[in-house]
Amino acid sequence: MPDYYFTKFEDRLPPAPLEHSRPVEIAWQVMALCSLIAGAIYIHWRWTASLNPDALWFAIPLAMAETCAYLGLILFTANLWQVRDYPREPAPANIADCVLDEEHLDRPISVDVFIATYNEDEEIVRLSIRDAMAITYPHPIDIRVHVLDDGSRPLMQAVAQEEGANYITREGNAGFKAGNLRNAMEQTSADFLVICDADTRPFPSILENTLGYFRDPDVAIVQTPQWFYDLPEGERLRDVWGRKAGALGRGLGGAIEAVAGEIRIGEDPFANDPAMFYDVIQRRRNGANAAFCCGAGSVHRREAVMFVALRAYADAIANASKEKRSSLDRLLRRRGDGGDVLARWQAAQEQELTPYKFHVSEDIYSTIVLHRDTDRNWKTVLHPQVESKMLSPQDLLSWTIQRFKYAGGSLDIFFHDNPVLKPGLSLGQRVMYLATFWSYFAALWNVVFLVAPVIYLFTAIPPIAAYTGDFFGHALPFLVLNELAFMLGTWGLSGFKGKVTYLSSFPISLGALWAVARGKKISFPVTPKLRQDGNFIRLVWPQVAVIIVTVVAIAWAAGALALGIAGYSLGGLIVNGLWGLNNILAMSVMVRAAFWKPPEEREADLKGAVPA
Amino acid sequence: MKFSEKLRRARSHLLIVAIMIVTSVIVVNLEDEALTNEVGSHPAHAALPGQ
């Protein structure tokens, strides 16, 4: 195997799923309810008694932003409310254990493992093939591994053949990954499909641990958590300070760590760790049957995939036949519905019955179609245990591409085929999907939260009547209860990086919103699997601008206060200064990520910089 | 996972709570002091335990 940067992480083991503790869950629920009540009181007070009447242009947008954030909080609380894992069943021995009509079926289960690739390093794909070939099962089973190469590369074909995998390719790459999967679906026939990206390396246990869910014939998709086994570990604070300031730095760093616990500098610089998303957000959607497919690491029932295709085909014919019928009616200058059959036949000729929709967020889209079907009551399951490992984006460009695709795809569904308002979903599913979409709109109010302290610091105009006990009496209980509630709600995970990334990634969500609002199609470029070289500062100029403007604003306000310029108060400066510092801290995470380099590259740079 | 490790992972929440409480107490006292100097009497709504 070539010496990749991740070779040294090969022996890493995935974290176990978060333990479910009923007492902690009850404490979270009580605290969350108290937080929401305190929040409702605060928001009511903000609108009825706190707006600065002399600056409504500033006070109202901020109150609106706070209200929108509060609605997001309600949705997020509903999402995190409780853990209700789907019951695990033993691995089925026969396909008859997994289908409704078992009469005529008495044979082992068959599974196709799809490894979708386009331009990734063939040797990385080789590792994925080897791991897929090593999948085990406690009963006789027919497992076939297919390499779906959209790049039509002879070398990839050779690697697939060397490893004993089937090689599938096609002309062109229409529809990108969805088109690639669609093409493979047409050439294979197993009962279940395991979807892998080029770098997804399934564990031997993936089928043994997931096929049991399919004993319920309504289970369509089982998603397993994605685990990035290559996340940088960072360095201990005492070691970093020790390197920079000798014994004194090491001692000081050690003292801080003795009080606060281990602190790692440079750990997971892009906040890639998906544990919060899979182990908390997705897992807690199981109760509402609202966990959605995320592609890699998921197991699909072929029948369900074809169901989605049939449903899409029927919808397309229905829509197209309406247009055809009106054209025919106009052509024949008649009224009534005599053209139905002809219009439908004509529309059916033009539509294509194909699985996997060509959409940048095809995974979530397919899940929505399944959830909306009231006849079959399809279920999706988030299996809490990690069953594969993959590579994380190693640079800000790859990270940005990935996040932009997520945001753009989700917003595109919201604007063009919004499931929240369409029939078919249960209330719980609507709430969960709305929580997902709402989170992408948060950039709109997060911008207000970034600008608000700057306005006060430059103008001395407060958005509230005064920073008195009345303000803190309403705001503090809400903010404290909210912090404590989410500490309990995510007990066992650190939410800090996720929170600051949520705030600092506002340009990505705004960009996606702008693109979708203009009707621009979100393209689906492949996220690079290996580190991209280059200067990524251009990607974080909005964050840099926020930092600079906020620092200048704090200095300006401090100077104005020192000079006794009317309007400024020390209390106002402290509140808005700390608010601004919080924003600077959040933005700095992203800016640091733009300059991040793996330790080996940093060392090489240093060596290169030393004259011979 | 040990309790101490879970607590370590929760420290950002606890730190933020501590900062918010301390800031609130300081700012309310500062603002009330300023108001007291302006109007000559202690504002009734600002009575906090220990004041």
Image: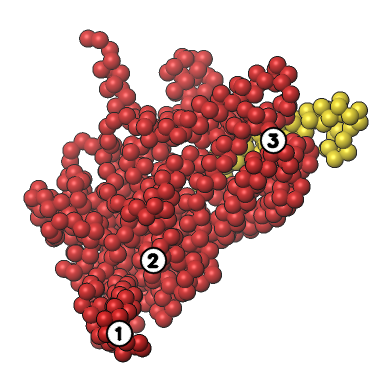
Chain colours: A red, B yellow
Q: Mark 1 points at which residue?
A: A333
Q: Which of marks 1 and 2 is nearer the N terminus?
A: 1
Q: Do labels 1 and 2 share a chain?
A: yes
User: Label 1 neighbourhood size at 10 Å, few (<14), some (14-19), many (20+)?
Assistant: few
Query: Which residue has dot 2 on it?
Result: A367
Q: Position of residue B24 (x, y in %)?
A: 73, 35
Label 2 is placed on what type of residue?
Thr
Q: Where is residue A370 in the image (x, y as percent from the top left)?
A: 39, 71
Chain at numbered mark 3: A
Residue A90 shows up from this direction: no
In the image, is residue A416 above or below residue A478? below
Query: Do the residues at discs 1 and 3 belong to one chain?
Result: yes
* Secondary structure of the residue carrying numbered label 3: loop
Q: Which of marks 3 and 2 is in front?
A: 3
Residue A102: percent from the left, percent from the top?
30, 84
Q: What amino acid type should be assigned to the residue bearing mark 1? A: Arg
Give the camera-side residue of A551 and A95.
A551
Kindly give the residue lying farthest to the top in the view shown: A612
Considering only order in the chain, which callout, 2 or 3, is on the residue closer to the N terminus? 2
Mark 2 surroundings within 10 Å by alpha-carbon count, few (fewer than 14), some (14 through 19), many (20 or more): many
Distance from label 1 to label 2 (Cα)?
42 Å
Instruction: Check disc 3 and give the amino acid type.
Output: Pro
Closer to us: mark 1 or mark 2? 1
Q: Distance between the residues labelled 3 and 2?
A: 46 Å
